Image (tube, rainbow, N blue to C red):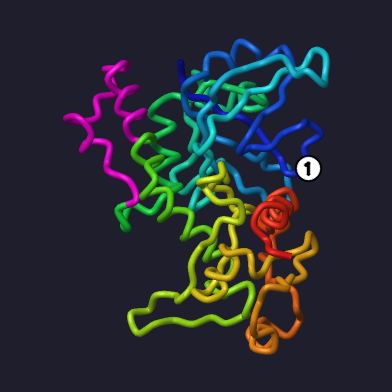
Amino acid sequence: MGFGVFIHRTDSIYDDSPAEQYQFPRQYLRRVEACVGDWIIYYEPSKVNDTRGYFAMAKVQQVIPDPAAPGMYLALIEPGTYLDFINPVPFNGADGLVERGLLNDEGRISGRAQSAVRPLSPADLNRIIDLAFDANELVLPRVDEIGGGFQEEQAPFQLEQSRDRVSYIGSRIVRDRIFRRIVLRAYDERCAITGLKLINGGGRAEVSAAHIRPVEANGPDVINNGIALSGTAHWMFDRGLISLSDDLEILISRQVNDLDSVHGFINKTRRALSPSRLSQRPHPRFLQWHREHCFKQ
């Protein structure tokens, strides 16, 4: 097992769904198989407009031949492990190249940087994680708090420390905090249904990060399965009294007993607000699940 970097772009020609599967050709099979049972980092190349750089992490569960595409394979992502970064990490940071394993003996970027799948050292993984998550909010422990110190020369020990660290980040309580930060930032801390942005006396937004397809129903912690909702809107959404069409029209259940009040409650456009970035907007497959399994028509 080992860590890896998987290159993914929003306009990919491959059948990718980062929270579920990653499609790749045979030439990368051995590299991907080396990541089975371990964590990978998703990277969006710099050639993409408004690139996110290193933007998410996930755990590879298994590799199978793609039944729909001869010569292609699928890396299946372990359910519930995908997690967007709070802070996408650029390829080149303030201290230079973030993924330093790409440097050759002369200190230049090697051809490995062009590989769609490549191994990632524990040191590089930790560097990316430090930049991706806000340590000031205690989202993640320092490396030297896990088992007695970070020792570069002890590779097996270093590897296990890194696995402990990403497992901590993958715990439910930490994932919920990260998911809230990401969703609320995407919606500018504004309820998508009412359009209101309410901040309490402590400076905290009175809005929550709701999963469109719930975690209990295998809904992933991916930004386009999230939506910012105020308390009442969240309650109605979870109970199927309101839902959304694929183009974000707000749907109201016939079982609502005070229709006039609900019409006055939702924003005047009758459409949910959405993030400006296309990749962050609610995905139709999650909205469809909510309409089919939760919405009371």
Is 220 left or right of 159, judged from the image as shown?
right
- Specify whether residue 104 is painted magenta: no
Q: Of helix, strand and loop, which one carries label 1?
A: loop
Report the side of 169 relative to 190 (left or right): left
Front-lying residue, 27 or 15: 15
- Give how far across and how far down residue 275 sits, in percent: 66, 65
Question: From the viewer's perspective, is residue 24 above or below residue 204?
Answer: above
Residue in view at x 47 percent, y 60 percent: 181
Instruction: Report if residue 55 is visible in the image.
Output: no
User: Callout 1, which amino acid?
Assistant: Asp
Residue 266 appears left or right of 168 = right
| Residues shaded magenta | 139-165
Pick whichever, 267 or 280, lies toward us.
Answer: 267
Q: Position of residue 258 (x, y in %)?
A: 65, 85
* Mark 1 nearby-residue class (10 Å; few <14, some 14–19, many ≥20): few
Residue 76 x %, y % = 61, 26
- Identified at 69% across, 89% down, the residue is 260
| Residue at position x 46%, y 15% in the image | 1
Which residue is the extreme one toward the left?
Answer: 148
Residue denoted by label 1: 11
Q: Residue at x 67, y 29 (%)?
A: 22
The relative height of residue 3 versus residue 229 in the rendered view (above or below) is above
Vertical arrangement, residue 116 with respect to residue 47, above or below: above
